[in-house]
Image (cartoon, rainbow, N blue to C red):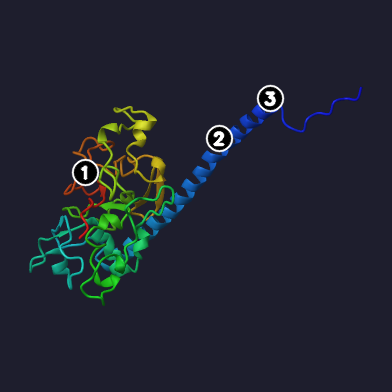
Amino acid sequence: MARRRRSKGLTLTELLVLIVVLALVVGFLVPLLSRRRSYATRMVCGSNLSGVGKAMMLYANDYAEELPRAGGRNSVWGQTVDWTASDRRRAYGLQADGSGGAATVGSSFYLLVKYAEVPPKAFLCLSPRPREKGVTEFKLGSYRLRDKKLTLTDLWDFGPNPSRHVSYAYQVVYSPHKLILSAEPNMAIAADRNPWMDAPVAKARGFSVFMPEVSPFNGTSDQARQGNTSRHQGDGQNVVFLDTHVAFEKRPHCGFENDNIYTTWDGHDKVRGKPPKLGSQPAGEKDSLLVNDPPASRK
């Protein structure tokens, strides 16, 4: 008898083997591609922060070695009075002698737009997956201006709600401790968004979930990761230091002497600390406290 010809289709066993192989390949490639996208995003974000850090140094060279600080000599961290004002005194609500007033963290960043030709887009972490919701590039057409002739360099802040146009956290400069070029070189001065402060469309992370891996806390890796920014898949944060170098730090206690760059401290616990709030100040000249403005209602 002639041999029966074998069917061209796959047997059930062969089909199952193929499915398993494909699943293994997909399981390997998807995380790999995700990591590559994450690395690319980190590099773009880090490049932005590097440019901002270098612009700060150039600014400081022109302003008595002091890094950008909006407001007057003793202004507090608060809402910029009039971001479209015709002069500095009206913008921050200063007294005739230059005292008093308030300014946002964003308005200190905005001095680099106003005086150092840094484009507003440089203050965004443009992560495509996931893109930060509620955050967009600040443009002249973002808000209605009374004077249509105003340019970016005429303004004093990223609009009435800087949180919508700034992804990065900056050192609290509204305190007795000046941020100057001669400060500790390894001091962190700017980084990705602070996880303990509200974002435009997201609430701050609950602080109780954060526990560093080091003694005396001895948290797990997952608990330690909770202290990272919400950007970059929670793997860490890009940080720019006073000597202008930028590093992707896997844990937030990366400041001078293991200082947590996102929390306040009372002189004892630097590694975990406490979550900041509007009005919080650094504990000393070497204490990094990087914060964002809380979201405000659109005006």
Decide which of tag 1 and tag 2 comes sooner along the chain.
Answer: 2
Question: Secondary structure under badge 1?
Answer: loop
Q: Nearer the viewer, mark 3 or mark 1?
A: 3
Quadrant location of the N terminus? Answer: top right
Question: Which residue is labeled 3 in the image?
Answer: 13
Q: Nearer the viewer, residue 99 or 285?
A: 99
Q: Is residue 16 left or right of residue 266?
A: right
In-image side of 283 versus 33 (left or right): left
> Which residue is most to the front?
1
User: What is the three-letter code of the residue carrying label 2?
Assistant: Gly
Q: CA distance from mark 2 to mark 3?
A: 21 Å
Quarter of image, res 97: bottom left
Residue 13 visible in this rendered orientation of the protein: yes
Badge 1 crowding class, 10 Å Cα cut-off, few under 14, some 14 to 19, many 20 or more, is many
Q: Residue furthest left?
A: 96
* Nearer the observer, 84 or 51: 84
Residue 282, percent from left and from top: 20, 47
Q: Residues within 10 Å of mark 3 (few under 14, many from 20)?
A: few
Residue positioned 30% across, 31% down in the render: 211
Of pointers 2 and 3, the one earlier in the residue sequence? 3
Mark number for residue 108?
none
The answer to whether marks 2 and 3 mark residues whose Cβ atoms lie closer than 8 Å is no
At label 3, the amino acid type is: Thr
Q: Which residue is mark 1?
A: 276
The residue that label 2 is drawn on is 27
Q: Nearer the viewer, mark 1 or mark 2?
A: 2
